[in-house]
Image: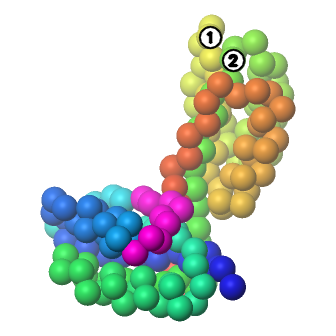
């Protein structure tokens, strides 16, 4: 049975770390659904949040292989977590601004930028809520949609 898994990785912030991790997935035919990387403040480490899916055997294999990578220090499978994703959605300036503002507010977002040619909405929510936002935004025929990828933190 396929299941989605969010994995947090702490690794030494050096060149080729991301290449090694993505190579591990590519070499075994696993898919990365979402990937987010950022340095950890005041350290030489990076936090990598990765979303993937597979059956329990595949997910177990992924975790084992990640632990074997030299620059990787920790690998955490999240069970109870806060999971967020950001979306930027660009609309033509012809789209009714009041309706875009109402859509943004209903998802805890806002108008991030606008001019005589376009309006850009930004929202940060769970991936499921971002999916809902994008589905509703499609009725306004957005010019462009960009998603950040998932970031997650364990709730303990």
Label 2–label 1 contact, CB within 8 A: yes
Residue 11 visible in rendering = yes
Question: Between 91 and 155, which is closer to the camera in this rendering?
Answer: 91
Using the rendered view, name the quadrant where residue 14 is placed: bottom left
Q: Which residue is mark 1?
A: 117
Query: Which residue is depicted at the point 43% across and 88% down?
Result: 61
Magenta segment: 28-36
Q: Is residue 36 toward the left or the right of residue 140 in the image?
A: left
| Position of residue 67 measured from the top left corner of the image (x, y, whole percent) | 30, 87
Q: Secondary structure at mark 2?
A: strand
Is residue 43 positioned above or below 7 on the image? above
Which label is found at residue 92? 2
Q: Is residue 123 toward the left or the right of residue 13 in the image?
A: right
Query: Which residue is depicted at the point 19% across and 61% down?
Result: 16
Q: Quadrant of the N terminus?
A: bottom right
Query: Which residue is depicted at the point 51% across and 55% down?
Result: 149
Residue 30 shown in magenta: yes
Is residue 82 positioned above or below 94 on the image? below
Residue 47 visible in rendering = no
């Amino acid at each position: 049975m396929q299941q989605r898994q969010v994995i947090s990785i702490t690794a030494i912030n050096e060149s080729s770390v991301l290449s090694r991790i993505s190579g591990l997935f590519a070499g075994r035919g696993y898919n990365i659904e979402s990937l987010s990387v950022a340095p950890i403040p005041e350290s030489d480490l990076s936090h990598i949040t990765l979303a993937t899916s597979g059956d329990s055997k595949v997910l177990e294999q992924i975790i084992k292989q990640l632990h074997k990578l030299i620059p990787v220090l920790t690998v955490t499978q999240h069970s109870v977590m806060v999971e967020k994703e950001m979306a930027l959605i660009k609309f033509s300036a012809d789209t009714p601004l009041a309706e875009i503002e109402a859509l943004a507010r209903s998802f805890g977002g806002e108008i991030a930028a606008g001019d005589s040619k376009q309006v850009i909405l930004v929202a940060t929510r769970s991936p499921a809520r971002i999916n809902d936002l994008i589905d509703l935004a499609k009725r306004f025929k957005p010019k462009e949609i960009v998603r950040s990828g998932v970031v997650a933190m364990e709730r303990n």
